[in-house]
Image: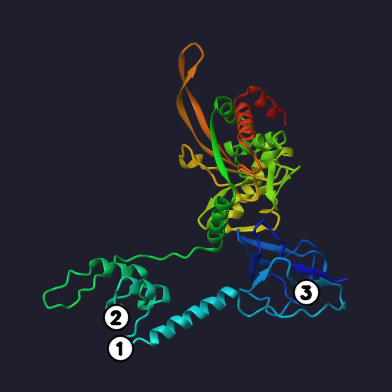
Amino acid sequence: MPVEVFVHKMTDHMESARIIQWLVKEGERVHEHQAIMEVETDKAVAELESPASGILKGIRPGAIEGAQVSVGQTLAFIAEPGEEVPALPPLPSESAQTTEAVSAKVAADTTQAEEPGRRVRATPAVRRIARELNVDLRLVRGTGPEGKITEQDVRVLAATRGVAPPDDTVTIVSPEPVEWVDLNTVQRLTGQRMVQSIQAAPQFAMTVSADMTNALQFLEAPAEPATETGESISVTVLLVKIVATTLKHHLRANASFEAGRIKVHKRVNLGVAIGVEEGLIVPVIKEADQKSLVQIARELQIFRQKARQMRFSTDDLSGGTFTISNLGMHGIDQFNAIVNPPQSAVLAVARIAKTPIALPGNTVAVRPMMNLTLTVDHRVVDGVQGARFLAEIKRRLEDPDTFRELKKI
């Protein structure tokens, strides 16, 4: 029986993907889990793997480079030699966004054609602003692409109006040159999700400061490299392990809010935010509580390498139940991260800084301190639950027994 080929849901909010290229031609033999297509998702470029071994057949008409396809939409089949497959209807030649963009351009061109005399290039929105500010667009010098008038051009002229020379000729003041940068797919959709998170989830944050003396002694002790490239255990690796272990005892922090109910996850799949030029990416370490420090370090190293090309497998970015965002390496003292829905919590990690600390006996010592800020969705985690979870992480980071146990793993 033919097996359908389709784009899987790789993140909680993913609805579609854009085909970059087919890696296999129709009629070629493929093996199960072999990469057969590259697609651009809301997070990165990912490789779509073959669901079975056989012959790639019946590629959907229109499923070509640049086509936008929905999650779960059948694109082709994997079948046996000589086996018939159903004929799929063609994909639309244009996405809804493309159609909307074309309509807007036609409307703008039509409006421009109605202007007498000098041809004015401006969108309907800019024309509306010009009417509100009583600005004659024929007097505005456009600084946009191909001389198109921008909103800023209109506002600059409106602000400088009234400073006319004696002969009543109009002096047009052009704004300083600017550069417009379009958001890529990752940046645009990440921004949309964060806005949705802030608007939909009642969030609050709490902070503790952990003494990292014992942790640093553990990290600085001579040890075998964690990876083939010689990377040693880092603060992030240590936090992944400690946070993942702590989550097993604080299940509300390892839950999500979906369809008006709380979904408590039994597995700890910990996402680690990685910042790259194209945006923020959050690959997921599956069952992080069950893995050693060396295993976690190796996975993070692989994720960083993949992030440089923004190419991940369909499994790398899915299934996260909790997220860590570490900006300590950038010198940040403290920050509040935004919950990644539908997850219920995210931990923001700041830098380690030498800080005077009051000790018993009215003495003061300088210790390496690190701020940890937990942001939670109040629908899932209340203040007491969040405080207990954060206090447990602090205790484990400061307890020498934690690191004695880690040396045994």
Q: Residue at x 86, y 79 (%)?
A: 84
The answer to the question of whether label 1 and label 3 lie on touching residues, with beta carbons closer than 8 A, is no
Q: Residue at x 74, y 38 (%)?
A: 290
Q: State the SS at label 2.
A: helix
* Residue at far left of view: 166
Q: Residue at x 34, y 73 (%)?
A: 130
Give how far across and how far down residue 238 sits, in percent.
62, 35
Q: Which mark is residue 138?
A: 2
Q: State the SS at label 1.
A: loop
Mark 3–mark 2 Cα distance, whole angstroms, equals 60 Å
- The residue pinned by badge 3 equals 28
Give how far across and how far down residue 276 sits, in percent.
53, 53
Say which label, 1 or 3, has the lower sequence index: 3
Say which label, 2 or 1, has the lower sequence index: 1
Q: State the SS at label 3.
A: loop
Quadrant assignment for the N terminus: bottom right
Mark 1–mark 3 Cα distance, whole angstroms, equals 61 Å
Residues 271 and 174: in front is 174
The answer to the question of whether label 3 and label 2 lie on touching residues, with beta carbons closer than 8 A, is no
Q: Amino acid at mark 2?
A: Arg
Query: Mark 2 packing: few (<14 Cα in 10 Å), some, or many (20+)?
Result: some
Residues 361 and 110: in front is 110
Q: Which mark is residue 117?
A: 1
Q: Residue at x 66, y 46 (%)?
A: 299
Q: Amino acid at mark 3?
A: Glu
Q: Is residue 118 left or right of 40 when viewed as pictured?
A: left
Say which label, 3 or 2, has the lower sequence index: 3
Give how far across and how far down residue 386 sits, in percent.
62, 35
Q: Amino acid at mark 1?
A: Gly
- Please determine whether, in this image, residue 166 is positioned above or below residue 402: below
* Residue at far top of view: 361
